C-alpha cells in the first residue's frame, strides 16, 4: 500500500439537497484548485457571499450531474455514510490526495446543515 501524500476528512450534516450542494461546490473547488482540468473549463459563481468556481465544460458536467443526482438520492434514503474522492497519478495510480466526506444522517434538519 502506498502512502497518501495528503488526506483530508470533512464531516457534515444536512438535508439531502444541502449536502449535495456542498459536494457540488466542494468537488468543483478541488478539481479547479488542483488544476485537474484547464481553468477555462470553470466559471465563477457567487454563492454564500463567496466566489466559487464551477465546471461549465459539457463533458465534465455530463459526468458530475448524474453523480450528484445519485448522491442526493442516496442521501435522501439515508444510504450514504461516506464519499471519498481520490486524486491519483495517471500512469502509476499512486494516490496523491484523498478527500473523505463523512456524512452523519441521524436527526437531520430539513433545511439546515452543519460542517464540523
Image (cartoon, rainbow, N blue to C red):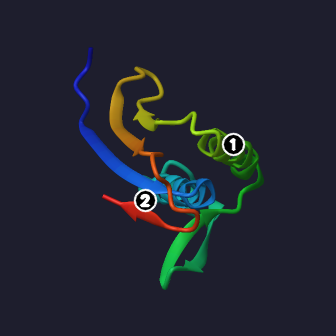
Q: Is residue 38 left or right of residue 66?
A: left
Q: Residue at x 41, y 30 (%)?
A: 89
Q: Residue at x 48, y 46 (%)?
A: 105
- The residue nearer to you, when weighing 78 against 90, is 78
Q: CA distance from mark 2 to mark 1?
A: 27 Å
- The residue nearer to you, when weighing 9 against 98, is 9
**Residue 65, x across and y down, in percent:** 72, 49
SS label for mark 1 = helix
Tag 2–tag 1 contact (CB < 8 Å) = no
* 54, above or below 34, in the image: below
**Residue 83, x across and y down, in percent:** 48, 38
Q: Residues within 10 Å of mark 1 (few under 14, many from 20)?
A: some
Q: Quadrant of the C terminus?
A: bottom left
State which quadrant residue 1 falls in.
top left
Q: Residue furthest bottom?
A: 49
State which mark lies toward you, 2 or 1.
Answer: 1
Q: Residue at x 58, y 63 (%)?
A: 110
Q: Residue furthest front?
A: 107
* 43, above or below 37, in the image: below
Mark positioned earlier in the residue sequence (2 or 1) = 2
- The residue nearer to you, when weighing 69 against 92, is 69
Picture disc at residue 33: 2
SS label for mark 2 = helix
Q: Is residue 106 left or right of residue 62?
A: left
Q: Residues within 10 Å of mark 2 (few under 14, many from 20)?
A: few
Q: Residue furthest top?
A: 1
**Residue 9, x across and y down, in percent:** 31, 45
* 6, above or below 24, in the image: above
State which quadrant residue 92 falls in.
top left
Picture disc at residue 95: none
Which residue is denoted by mark 1 in the rendering?
Answer: 73
**Residue 80, x across and y down, in percent:** 53, 36
Amino acid at each position: 500500500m502506498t502512502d497518501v501524500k495528503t488526506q483530508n476528512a470533512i464531516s457534515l450534516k444536512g438535508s439531502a439537497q444541502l449536502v449535495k450542494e456542498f459536494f457540488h461546490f466542494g468537488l468543483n473547488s478541488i478539481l479547479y484548485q488542483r488544476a485537474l482540468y484547464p481553468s477555462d473549463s470553470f466559471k465563477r459563481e457567487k454563492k454564500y457571499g463567496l466566489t466559487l468556481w464551477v465546471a461549465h465544460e459539457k463533458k465534465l458536467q455530463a459526468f458530475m450531474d448524474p453523480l450528484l443526482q445519485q448522491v442526493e438520492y442516496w442521501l435522501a434514503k439515508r444510504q450514504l455514510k461516506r464519499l471519498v474522492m481520490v486524486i491519483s497519478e495517471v500512469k502509476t495510480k499512486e494516490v496523491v490526495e484523498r478527500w473523505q466526506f463523512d456524512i452523519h444522517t441521524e436527526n437531520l434538519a430539513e433545511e439546515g446543515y452543519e460542517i464540523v
